[in-house]
Amino acid sequence: MPDENPAGKPLGDESPERPEDKPADTSTKDTSTKEPDGKAPEPPEPKDDLVTTHHQLRVGRRRLAYTATAGRVVLREEEHKDGTFRGNKARAEISMTTYTLDGADPRTRPVVFAFNGGPGSSSVWLHLGLLGPRRVVMGDVGHLEPPPYGLMDNRESLLTVADLVFIDPMSTGWSRAVEGGKPGDYHGYQRDIEHVGELIRLWTSRNKRWMSPKFVAGESYGTLRGAALAAHLQDRYGMYLNGLILISSVLDLSSIDFEKQRNDRAHALYLPTYAAIAHYHGKHGRRSLRSVLQEAEAYAARDLPWVLSRGARLSPDERAEAVSTMARLSGLSGDYIDRCDLRIEHWRYFTELLRDQRLSVGRLDARFTGPAASAIAENMDADPSHDAIMGPYAAAWNHYVREDLGYASDLHYEQITSRVMPWSFKDFEGRPVDVSDRLERAMRQNPHLRVHVSYGYYDGATPHFAAEDVFAKLRLPDSLRANIEHAYYEAGHMMYVHEPSRVQQSRDLADFVVRSSGLPT
């Protein structure tokens, strides 16, 4: 449909017209767009916009026939005003993509609800990087594919053991508020959980899947969302999950928060990640990664917190020893460690480690490097790992959703956006943003809930040792703590970018889903 100008004529179709050529208007009809009561007309009622297609995935000798559904679902909210019920009003149109195995028994077929984080990220990364039936071909460090990249069947897809529902939270992907609505109302911790939870309830009810084993999978901020969502689904709907998948976990933001430079906890918990990154870039000679991590983790757990807590009370010898140890583990110079007062800020670390080579190190995945815009900059101008993944995923998704899934929209698919900012954490005013208590509550309420946590050693955004610290402090009995399992990969934040890690992680997740569903292995 062509755009229209204010007069209602299609643009480009106007013909010159002189005022004297116009006939006099002698009609008395009301051309106002207002309703009889003087109010502007209500916008049209939005409807679900979904497209269904059928596909096959070959896995070994098997051919899996599955149905894909892509598009946008209208979310409604009950409206009450002055004690009066005003109806179930449309508030948002949320984009999602689902895959269900044809002919499967819903009582035994698990379903996994998946999303990424940000806040402000669509689900395209888990969708085309790890879990979905098709995956992007982008290469890896040192062997990146050139544009326009590629797309191929994912024989390790989690679809082999579970149905998949990929969710794009408000303002990501094609998710938008309804016409006249306020997307900012959803840009915050609580409302984010509520609308994602409502979409899960709606899909489960419409597809008659209440008796299916159910899982939630989140990455990065999606792990914070996922942990809180597990408790919300139980408390609000009585929907108990079988499992929670946390990829690159951060449940307590104070464990990684450097905004307050005296947050010594975060400075200590980051050190093992710095040591792993230094090892990858050749700063530890022939030592194994495991031996480097063992030393760094032991130092970060015991000695470094004490050192940082002492401040000026450290003796010269104690300070010199700390500077030497931190320099050796992190790969930075002793002079730099001393000048930063033993407190390495992570953005500066990625700029400093290979400064002598005029390279920046990736934050999302420190295996990646890129030329520094300035050899004297305090912080790198861009994350080379983020630069490496953006193009391949954008090309793959925009082709795949139109060509294979048959869904198209002229809206821009917000792969990752800043439009959700500022993000509201008003629920945590005056205290750290920490949802570990929500996970504790969910596990105590549902003792069958199992949790799988995936870590990347070269992840500079959500360091593994910080996440471990949070899990170690959960207030749980040993019987429930045994429901938490941990998996580690020599990769970054999106560990599936690294092919050996992707293959192993796919196996680990499939095994977790099968075991947690109580299905035969």
Image: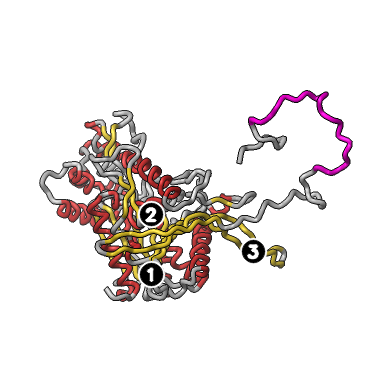
Amino acid under label 1? Pro
Q: Which residue is mark 3?
A: 88
From the viewer's perspective, is 507 left or right of 172?
left
User: Is 443 one of the magenta-colored residues?
Assistant: no
Q: Residues within 10 Å of mark 3 (few under 14, many from 20)?
A: few
Query: What whole-number distance in Å separates the C-alpha atoms at marks 3 and 2?
Result: 31 Å
Q: Nearer the viewer, mark 3 or mark 2?
A: 2
Residue 127: mark: 2
Amino acid under label 2? His
Which badge, 2 or 1, is on the more N-terminal residue?
1
From the viewer's perspective, is 297 left or right of 384?
left
- Disc 1 is placed on an element classified as loop
Q: How is the image coloured?
A: secondary structure
Which badge, 1 or 3, is on the more N-terminal residue?
3
Q: Is residue 75 above or below residue 213?
A: above
Q: Quadrant of the C terminus?
A: bottom left
Q: Which residues are magenta?
A: 12-31
Quadrant of the image occupied by residue 363: top left
In front of the other: 513 or 103 = 103
Query: What whole-number distance in Å separates the C-alpha atoms at marks 1 and 3?
Result: 30 Å
